[in-house]
Amino acid sequence: MIERVYSGELSPEKDGEEVSIAGWVHEKRKLGGLLFLLVRDRDGIVQVTLPKKFVPAEVFETAKGVSKESVVVVKGKLQAMDKAPGGVEVIPSQIEVLSSAASPLPLDPTGKVPANLDTRLDHRVLDLRKPQVAAIFKIRSRALKAAREHLLSQGFIEVHTPRIISTASEGGTELFPISYFEREAFLAQSPQLYKQMLMGSGLDRVFEIATYFRAEEHDTIWHLNEITAVDCELAFISGYEDVLKVIEGLICAMIREVKEHCSQELERLGVELEVPRTPFPRLTYAEVLSLLEEEANLKLPFGEDLTTEAEKKLGEIMHQRGHELYFVTRFPLDAKPFYTMPDSEDPELSASFDLEFKGREIISGSQRIHDYDLLVQRIKAKGLREQNFSSYLEAFKYGMPPHGGFGMGIERFLMLLLDLPNIREAVLFPRDRHRLEP
RNA sequence: GCCCUGGUGGUGUAGCUCGGCCUAUCAUACAGGACUGUCACUCCUGUGACUCGGGUUCAAAUCCCGACCAGGGCGCCA
């Protein structure tokens, strides 16, 4: 490794030490006989100060000629200096340009001149050099670390189900077809059927953090064609309420971790977080319909999923009541997939739920059907073909415990957590209807 | 897929309503110059753009049509 320290490790107490720093030339300011280079690394920015009379001539010339965003290694003496940003500066004895950046730059990594999202995504590597953009992905990493550790601590084991699946048989969302030797196959849209099958394996509690593919031609700030999800499934539940408790623990663990360990990143994004109180409110679908009619004068027909408008209105109502996170439960059975358990009291309803965050759905889940005959009946009722599900159904023939689970879209979670204006902000290299590069 | 809005130097924009005073505004970036404490340094000089195709007109960045691209809303969405 090239010997160096990160800018975050430099402090005025280290005055006089010989240091080596490495990074990108963030800014260059020439004042005749005095030259400032601002060098940016993963931690932040450190000032390199070159008084012409006190640094070697070739070092001064190198610094003067280096283009913005070039990669440099600077060796020199650390100096405590009130006038310098961060209170320290480096007086270089040596500057090496490891990689010279071409100019002009296609966008401005200092963020002085704004760029449109499309331009930013076209030049995403440069865009990611902005501290506030990088902050999103440091937070994403932390949130997923917390999710993984929390679920492991709750007795879940991490699994990996296939990305390549055989049939477009689940119904619902569109699949991307791929060529699999002499056959057609598809990219997985979710681990749904596999995580359920694992409930019959005795693994008992599983989770998967993975990428999924959805071929819908939607084109909104709220949809992607390649997403990352945290999926959980747990067995021996008494009802979907057991699943809701897992979700509450998971969400709180993720937000707590980010709040405690990403204060600098949150500050850069101008976001203040609060760990939500539990339990989150639970509203039934029927309660939501009457609430919307009473408080928002919005009448929805019973039986259909909530519209975008209805979700937003509900979000406003719940916000006024002091809740950003809340469950909507017991959706009409017809609006949910075939494997959803019917409600024990009302056969028109289901043991299902969504978690809403600021008026948007981030989690969807349910108790699942574990009875073989009922499952076959529901597959037929949805107009699907039983034979397409034979390997899935086999898992229900030889002993399947009651179980339930959920899937959470990570990008949606981050978008709402950090108040990002577009879901593409939460993905390094987003895939949408039109974008396949970079 | 439907509806709405837009496309001007590398980047972000003004100008379009009401065609001509546009040899196109401003900022930033870039090149050159002055400057020893900058921190969006300052100052001087310079380079650089009307998405493409067709139409109307004496005259089009500006009006009309089409294509392409982008942004937003809706639908779709485990």
Image (cartoon, grey):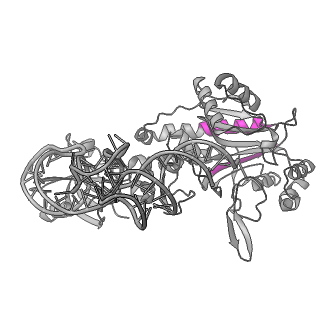
Inspect this view and state whether residue A320 appears: yes
Q: Is residue A100 above or below residue A338?
A: below
The percent position of residue A270, horizontal first and vertical second, equals 42, 37
Q: Residue at x 81, y 38 (%)?
A: A350
Q: Is residue B7 above or below residue A403?
A: below
- Is residue A300 inside the magenta stretch? no
Query: A178 or A259, which lies in front?
Result: A178
- The span shown in magenta is A229-252
Q: Is residue A355 above or below residue A122?
A: above
Tag count:
0
The percent position of residue A250, horizontal first and vertical second, equals 64, 40
From the viewer's perspective, tell me whether residue A432 is left or right of residue A375: left
Q: Is residue A234 above or below residue A295?
A: below
Q: Residue at x 61, y 45 (%)?
A: A147
The percent position of residue A434, horizontal first and vertical second, equals 54, 59
Inspect this view and state whether residue A12 appears: no
Query: A269 or A169, which lies in front?
Result: A169
Query: B32 or A253, which lies in front?
Result: B32
The percent position of residue A317, horizontal first and vertical second, equals 61, 26
- Is residue A236 inside the magenta stretch? yes
Q: Residue at x 39, y 48 (%)?
A: A131
Quadrant (top left/top right/bottom left/bottom right) for the N terminus of chain A: bottom left
Q: Residue at x 70, y 43 (%)?
A: A364
Task: Please identify the quarter of the rendering in which residue A179 is found.
Answer: bottom right
From the viewer's perspective, tell me whether residue A259 is left or right of residue A307: left
Task: Please identify the quarter of the rendering in which residue A360 is found.
Answer: top right
